[in-house]
Structure formats: C-alpha cells, structure tokens
Amino acid sequence: MKKLLLLALLAQTAAAEEAPPDGPPGPPSRWGLGVGAVASDSPYAGEGTRVMPVPLISYQGEKFFFQGIRAGWQFIRNDAFELAAIAQFKFDGFDIDDLGRQQLAANGLDYRLLEDRDDSLDAGVTAKWSGMAGEIELELLTDVTDRSGGQQFSLQYGYPLHWGQTMVTPNVGVTWLSDDTANYYYGTLDKEVARGVMDYKPDAAAIPHVGINVMRFFGRNWSAFAFLKYSVLPDEIKDSPLLEPDSDGSASILIGLSRNF
C-alpha cells in the first residue's frame, strides 16, 4: 500500500511544475496543493487491490524543490535540460501481516517464519532532456540506509501531445533493480532460510512499463490529472514465492486535482 503513496506524490511533480500549454512561464517559486486518489493491484500474495485518498504537496524554488517524499537541488534547469541531486523515501517495504497467509502457504511459505521488509531512503541523481522529439528521463539511486544495500536505475521516454488546455503524454520505460534490491524485496532473506524457508534469490531484474499521463488545465493555477501505469514483471520477480503465482504485471492509477500558488 505504501507504493501507492509513492506513486501519488511523485506524479504530483508534473501537476506542480507544468504550466498551461498556451500560458506564460510560471513563477520561479511556487507551491502545489491538491488531493487525489490512488489505486493499485499488488502482485504480493493476498494483498489484492486497494484504493486510498492522498494529499498532494509540492514546492519548486529556484534551486531547491520537494514533492512530498522527495527533495532535491537542481544544478541545471532550463527548457531543454534538467539535472538534480535528489533524496527520496522508498516505500517498497511491506508488513508480512498485510499478505495472505493462505496464499503464502500455497506457495510453500509459513508466514510465521518471514520478516517484514523495511522502507528505505534512496539518494542519487536525476536528469531530463526535453525537445521536439519528446522527453527522456534518467534516474540513478542507491539505498543509503542499507536496508537492501542495492541500486535502482530508471529510464523513461514520453511524448507530450497538446490539445488546447489538455496535455496527454504516453510513455514507456524500464526500471533496473540490482540483485541486492531484487533479493530484499522479492527473495527470501538469509535469516528466513535459516529458519527453514525456501531459498529464493532472484538476480538483478529489469521491469519494463507503459503508461499515459493526462492533464487538463483550468486557467493559470488549477489542473486535473490522471496517471496510469502498467509494469510487466520479469521471470526473476514473478517466480518469487512472495507473489501471487499468476502475477505477470501490476497496474496503478492516480487521479487528482491541484492548485499552484
């Protein structure tokens, strides 16, 4: 469920930073406040689909910015290129009690022998190139709290389409998880194996995704938006005994309304 909050707060970035397609550039400093609802079908055994309302808060200064769970410093920011150092909370952890005991047992796992997976704080760099051919976003992060001790690399391409005050951005991308990251969130831990749990250690994994972002502007300050994303799980992930046996992918959606100040 924590991943839903992450999706919502990061998606709010676009609503806070974008100006209306035909409008003048925004002020150097602005706040974004809004409310949204986010839903996702979790691939973890027995967790199912949940819906949650979330507040959306962001700030963009000349250099410093934050979007709820992410903060950073922009070294370069212009119409064509952005480069920033960032730190953000990683909400990929989960409580074993939130998973289905029967579903775990069907996968050969005794929930009483399993450990919770903790959240972490990641730090790294992000870059974005924008032009007539679309937008490319690159992100490199590492776990600085040593929960997993791993790294994550993300690459995404999107092409914004404008119709008056409406902007639609189809996108495709891939997220690469190091073996340490994949092992922590989708494998079984050494302490669990020592208790008799099956030993499952996935290798590094690449998770591709497709999505579409829709934004509708109302004047200079208001915007409504919807973000839809579908991720395809590779064999290294979907073969995990922590997941539903037929989990080939997962979908997430956010809808919301925001006002810039």
Image (spheres, rainbow, N blue to C red):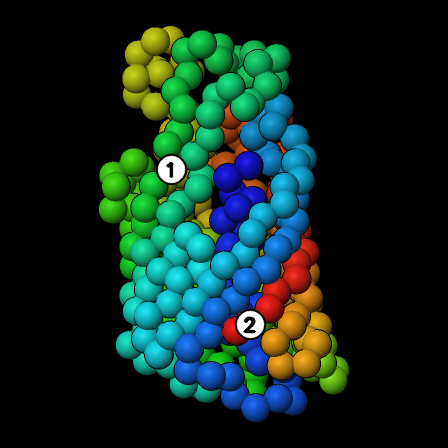
- Does residue 45 lie above or below 181 as drawn? above
**Image-quadrant location for residue 188:** top left
The percent position of residue 104, horizontal first and vertical second, equals 55, 17
Q: Residues within 10 Å of mark 2 (few under 14, many from 20)?
A: many
Q: Are marks 1 and 2 in contact (CB under 8 Å)?
A: no
- Does residue 12 lie above or below 179 as drawn? below
The percent position of residue 182, horizontal first and vertical second, equals 40, 38
Q: CA distance from mark 1 to mark 2?
A: 30 Å
The percent position of residue 191, horizontal first and vertical second, equals 30, 17
At 41% across and 85% down in the image, what residue appears?
Answer: 78
Which quadrant, please, contains the N terminus? top right
In terms of secondary structure, where does tag 2 sit?
Answer: strand
Q: Nearer the viewer, residue 216 or 183?
A: 216
Examine the rendering and report whether any part of residue 116 can be seen.
yes
Q: Which residue is mark 1?
A: 119
- Does residue 188 lie above or below 215 as drawn? above
Q: Is residue 32 left or right of residue 198?
A: right
Q: Earlier in the sequence, mark 1 or mark 2?
A: 1
In terms of secondary structure, where does tag 1 sit?
Answer: loop
Q: Residues within 10 Å of mark 1 (few under 14, many from 20)?
A: some
- Residue type at mark 1: give it: Asp
At 54% across and 23% down in the image, what residue appears?
Answer: 98
- Residue type at mark 2: give it: Asn
Q: Which residue is mark 2?
A: 260
The percent position of residue 92, horizontal first and vertical second, equals 45, 39
Examine the rendering and report whether any part of residue 179 can be seen.
no
Q: Which label is found at residue 145?
A: none
At 44% across and 60% down in the image, what residue appears?
Answer: 67
**Image-quadrant location for residue 129:** bottom left
Looking at the image, which residue sits at the far front?
261
